């Protein structure tokens, strides 16, 4: 079984889609935002109230995943305070050991410093209506888990982090694990206003796999943090899958997942209103059935891309919806970076209402050794954007555009801009207020069976 087949099996339960996701209407005025995933309960988010002095014992059969661990530790029974009055770091760290499941029963758990477990095999941290509460002023990493070559098989599941108080927050989990990395149902309530990016996950063995499922971080971060929502870091060499996640409002990329090595799969989910890129990938990564939406224009943001392919050979974007309704500057709904050798976008819908914003921009190559082949197949591009062009390509060879429908109603809007490039335009339909196709410099555009008939004139 290859890595991607394994990941598909691992995450099959979540493939159905993000809860409440609306159907994209390319000709409508508004597309409702998807509903969030499962919300934290009142126990997780409310201020702690008086509870009995003894926490009731949780029957072992009600604790999930016990079958894969030799030892199961109920954190409350181990002496942790469940009312956020005393730090639980010491008792937690004492139990972060091999073949151990640490269970956090319902309650609120105060954290005043980083919890570390650099070396382990088969470690689980699983909650039930459990909320981590930072000590006032605490702005560092909460769980620092694993190092390359030292850790494998991590399960982190069903835990909420409460960042609603000012001056608290930062990274809930940093996980560098060789193989078997699973982060599921991690929620953050409140906007991050200190520290670094939210979540870091690296699969550090080339044959390793990981899954991040139903991550919910909808409140974002203030601009001064320079935070990203999720980082796949430089130690990543394996394959990691993001399934049905919600990431919104970060100043330095929503999903920042373009390491030099390894692959990333992004399946389902909602990514909105982040700066630089909402979804950023490279290499032979895949983005499938993802909804990206930009409809805000924060003053300090400068370039709100939808999906960005930065580098590598063979990336695929398919069956996605990208909406560029309102932005604080952007060079495209889907952009191909200078280091991208080849990539394909297919069966995707892009709506652009923001003026001077391309639906697709293909930048000139720098330092790439491949044939620079870019293919767009079966795209529907709509919206009222004015000026610039729907599809723009610079200094590329052998670009193929087939089965594209471009209908943009804004003033002085062109269909294709082909700049010092060669392109084949086949079976495309273009209705714009400007020119269907504009060529610049030493460009060649071969047009076959496209509308209007004078598309190449």
Image: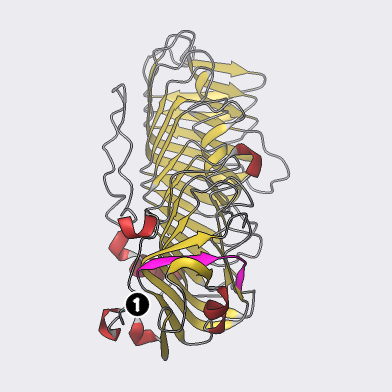
Q: How is the image coloured?
A: secondary structure
**Which residue sits at x=35%, y=84%?**
66
Left/right of residue 103 with respect to residue 363 in the rendered view: left
Foreground pick, 144 / 137:
137
Q: Quadrant of residue 184?
A: bottom left
* Residue ID for mark 1: 55
Q: Secondary structure at mark 1?
A: loop
Total marks shown come to 1
* Left or right placement of residue 390 versus residue 444 in this view: left
Number of residues whose C-alpha sits closer than 10 Å to that of mark 1, classed few (under 14), some (14–19) or many (20 or more): some
Residue 312 highlighted magenta (yes or no): no
Residue at 46% across, 8% down: 411
* Residue furthest out toward the bottom: 70
Residue 348, percent from left and from top: 37, 38
**Which portion, as a residue range, is magenta?**
106-115
Q: Residue at x 51, y 57 (%)?
A: 264
Viewer-proximal residue among 191 and 138? 138
Q: Is residue 41 visible?
A: no
Q: From the viewer's perspective, is 96 left or right of 31? A: right
Decide if residue 298 is in sight here: yes
Of residues 450 and 97, the one nearer the viewer is 97
In x, y percent, where is residue 35? 30, 43
| Above-or-below relation of 90 to 419 | below
Magenta residue check for 113: yes
Residue 9: % across, % down: 34, 69
Closest to the observer, 169 or 409: 169
Q: With respect to residue 315, does 437 lie above or below?
A: above
The residue that appears at 38% across and 29% down in the rendered structure is 404
Principal secondary structure, stretch drawn in magenta: strand
**Where does the N terminus fall, quadrant-wise?**
bottom left
Residue 114 spot, x, y in % from top left:
62, 68
């Amino acid at each position: 079984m290859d890595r991607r087949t394994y990941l598909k099996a691992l995450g099959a339960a979540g493939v159905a889609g993000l809860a409440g996701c609306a159907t994209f209407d390319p000709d409508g005025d508004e597309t409702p935002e998807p509903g969030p995933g499962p919300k934290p309960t009142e126990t997780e988010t409310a201020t702690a109230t008086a509870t009995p002095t003894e926490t009731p014992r949780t029957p072992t059969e009600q604790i999930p995943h016990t079958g894969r661990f030799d030892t199961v530790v109920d954190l409350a029974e181990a002496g942790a305070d469940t009312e956020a009055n005393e730090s639980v770091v010491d008792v937690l760290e004492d139990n972060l050991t091999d073949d151990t499941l640490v269970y956090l029963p319902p309650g609120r758990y105060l954290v005043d410093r980083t919890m570390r477990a650099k070396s382990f095999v088969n470690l689980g941290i699983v909650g039930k209506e459990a909320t981590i509460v930072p000590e006032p002023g605490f702005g560092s990493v909460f769980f620092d888990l694993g190092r390359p070559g030292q850790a494998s098989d991590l399960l982190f599941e069903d835990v909420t982090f409460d960042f609603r108080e000012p001056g608290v927050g930062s990274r809930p989990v940093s996980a560098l694990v060789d193989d078997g990395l699973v982060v599921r149902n991690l929620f953050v309530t409140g906007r991050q206003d200190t520290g670094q990016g939210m979540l870091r996950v690296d699969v550090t063995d080339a044959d390793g796999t990981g899954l991040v499922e139903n991550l919910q971080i909808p409140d974002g971060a203030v601009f001064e943090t320079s935070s990203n929502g999720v980082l796949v870091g430089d130690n990543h060499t394996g394959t990691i899958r993001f399934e049905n996640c919600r990431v919104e409002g970060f100043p330095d990329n929503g999903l920042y997942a373009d390491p030099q090595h390894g692959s990333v799969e992004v399946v389902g989910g909602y990514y909105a209103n982040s700066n630089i890129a909402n979804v950023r990938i490279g290499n032979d990564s895949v983005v499938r059935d993802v909804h990206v939406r930009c409809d805000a224009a924060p003053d300090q943001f400068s370039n709100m891309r939808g999906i960005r392919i930065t580098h590598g050979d063979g990336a695929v974007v398919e069956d996605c919806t990208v909406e560029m309704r309102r932005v604080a500057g952007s060079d495209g709904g889907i952009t191909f970076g200078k280091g991208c050798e080849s990539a394909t976008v297919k069966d995707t819908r892009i709506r652009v209402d923001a003026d001077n914003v391309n639906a697709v921009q293909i930048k000139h190559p720098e330092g790439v050794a491949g044939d620079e082949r870019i293919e767009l197949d079966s795209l529907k591009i709509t919206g009222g954007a004015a000026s610039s062009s729907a599809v723009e390509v610079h200094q590329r060879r052998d670009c193929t555009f087939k089965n594209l429908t471009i209908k943009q109603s804004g003033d002085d809007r062109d269909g294709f801009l082909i700049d010092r490039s060669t392109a084949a335009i086949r079976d495309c339909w273009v209705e714009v207020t400007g020119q269907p196709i504009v060529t610049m410099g030493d460009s060649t555009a071969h047009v076959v069976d496209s509308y209007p008939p004078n598309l190449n004139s």
